[in-house]
Amino acid sequence: MKDIPVIYVRNLVKKFGSFTANDGLDFEVYEGEIFGFLGANGAGKTTALRILSGLSKPTSGIVRVAGFDAGNEAEQIKRNIGYMSQRFSLYEDLTVKENIMLFGGIYGLRKREITGKTADLLSRLSFEEYGDRLIASLPPGLKQKLAFSVAVLHDPKIVFLDEPTGGVDPLTRRQFWELIYESASRGITVFVTTHYMDEAEYCDRISIMSEGRIVALDTPENLKKQYNAVSIDEVFVKIARSPEKIV
Amino acid sequence: MKRFFGFVKKEFLHIFRDFRTLIILFGIPASQILIFGFVISTDIENAGIAFLDLSKDEISTGISDRICSSGFFSRTADLAGYEEADRVMKSGRAKAVIIFPAGFGREFLSGRQTTISIIADGSEPNTATLITSYASAIISDFNREYTAPGMTAPLPVQPEVRMFYNPGLKSHYMFVPGVITLILILICALMTSITIAREKEFGTMEVLLVSPLKPSQIIIGKVMPYFFLSFINVIVILLLSWLVFDLPVRGSLALLLAETMLYIMMSLSLGILISTFTANMQQAIFISLIGLMLPTILLSGFIFPIENMPKIYDVLSSVLPPRYFIVIIKNLMIKGKSFSYVWKETLILTLMTIVFLGISIRNFKIRLE
């Protein structure tokens, strides 16, 4: 299982005029893996994420997502991925069921399929009594979990999570990661960007970006060993100070 | 296609669940019509009226007494000459002057046709129309009493009506076309720009863009409900103006509705365009209100005739789509003219729609890059 790359990136370059946002990225992400994508603001994470999710095209390089080319098969990529952002991604003025129905429909699921999945999803989250409530009336933790469940409703090959736990308390974050693990165990690849270094430790592998390049990529344990650090936070600080960065 | 309809349904849910949106969509058109209706239908009571009686005979005093005893008018001045008519109306003491020419009674008794002049202050068009039609009605009552039943000869006294200050009474029929023009651009452009800005502000636009929905489907899906609801609004306004104010559509109804659809599409494109350069709802509302509503009211010819504007405002208003739609709707609705009179305006609106959509698509693509 672990050796099939669902994301394959070779020498990805993205330029905006004279500014190079992504400067020769190389990495691959395997099926069922939880891949952490780290980096300071402005390091080029968002640009890479937009290319991987079919929103923008690479200037040069090979980018294959779920078997499709990001340059000219963006539509097929979009059908095979799920997406959830830090900014809340469900409609507040629709009920839980209406949101599920909407996104299920957008991803081409049949009505009967959606109804089955809705019941399944609500019972898995012990949400049964919330089905007809407006999203606006739910506590933030529940919304977050629901948003994730909706993002993987259509069983995508990959789900992209863009800082999914921003502004959520640690306990909810913990529960949220349980959902992520569960999806990964079902074979859904999870590609997650985060600011929280403790969250990075939950990932199978992490990459750290700086100034448009990937400066480190390995399992959290190996990185800690390599940089002689006790936490990913420390790794991050050491990388930020290292002289290679200036080159 | 199924994805698309689910998306449109969601858009309707947004509209019907938001009280403020509903107010804007249905409350404003109804209240505009009612406000204008109220202004239009004010009855006259004891309106000041001045008489210039150059004949001073039994018949002329009889008619003027009859006018004053009707309850609608009160005699506020008796004038000695024509030159006083202007002064008495400008001072506001009289809303109208009724003039009996010299020798009026003699002519009348000798069986020849005679004329009474009614000069009304046209700067208040509604009052002026009411006064002249009431006075004319009283005069024709008088006629009827003095002519034998069944007589077919021309009535002996002809009221001759003239308006001072606003001879054509232009603004009288303007309000229905004006309200339609204003409501449509307001609802379509404002609501579209708000609804798209809202998706951006809440971050749901990103989710939609990453989904298999095409950007064009997202945009069309978002504006489609507003197209339908605006069209319903137009029909309601036309029905109200016909039933309440007796203003039927004189020209081709089908053509009028087709032109209205074009105007709705133009307004929707304008709303999409506004949304491409606004980041949140506040900006969208601000631009739509300041940039569209005020110029539409002030410069499009809705309230102030463009012919009377200084050149600079005339030029400014030529970039405003409502200006052209007002011409179209006036010609089709009030004057009952055919397409050959409005093809130029139709062409301009079509071009504007294309330009607005073109710039929107370009802006949208730049943002995606």
Image: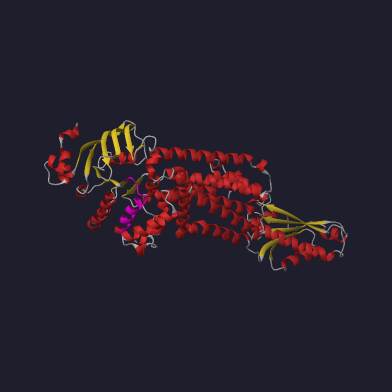
Whether residue B88 is visible here, answered yes or no, is: no
**The C terminus of chain A sits in image quarter:** top left
Q: Is residue B97 left or right of residue A177?
A: right
Q: Is residue A178 left or right of residue B346?
A: left
**The N terminus of chain A sits in image quarter:** top left
Whether residue A4 is visible here, answered yes or no, is: yes
Residue located at (49% from left, 49% from top): B223
Q: Residue B323, percent across and down? A: 57, 45
Q: Nearer the viewer, residue B212 or B313?
A: B212
* Above or below: residue A231 compared with residue A69: below
Q: Nearer the viewer, residue A185 or B218?
A: A185
Q: Residue B23, percent across and down? A: 49, 59
Q: Nearer the viewer, residue B36 or A190?
A: A190
Q: Residue A78, percent across and down? A: 38, 43
Q: Residue B128, percent across and down? A: 67, 57
The mark total stands at: 0
> Bounds of the magenta span?
A142-158
Which scheme is used to colour this image of the protein? secondary structure
Q: Give the quadrant of residue A57.
A: top left
Q: For the view shown, which residue lies furthest in the front direction? A: A1
Q: Give the quadrant of residue B310.
A: top right
The answer to whether residue B223 is magenta is no
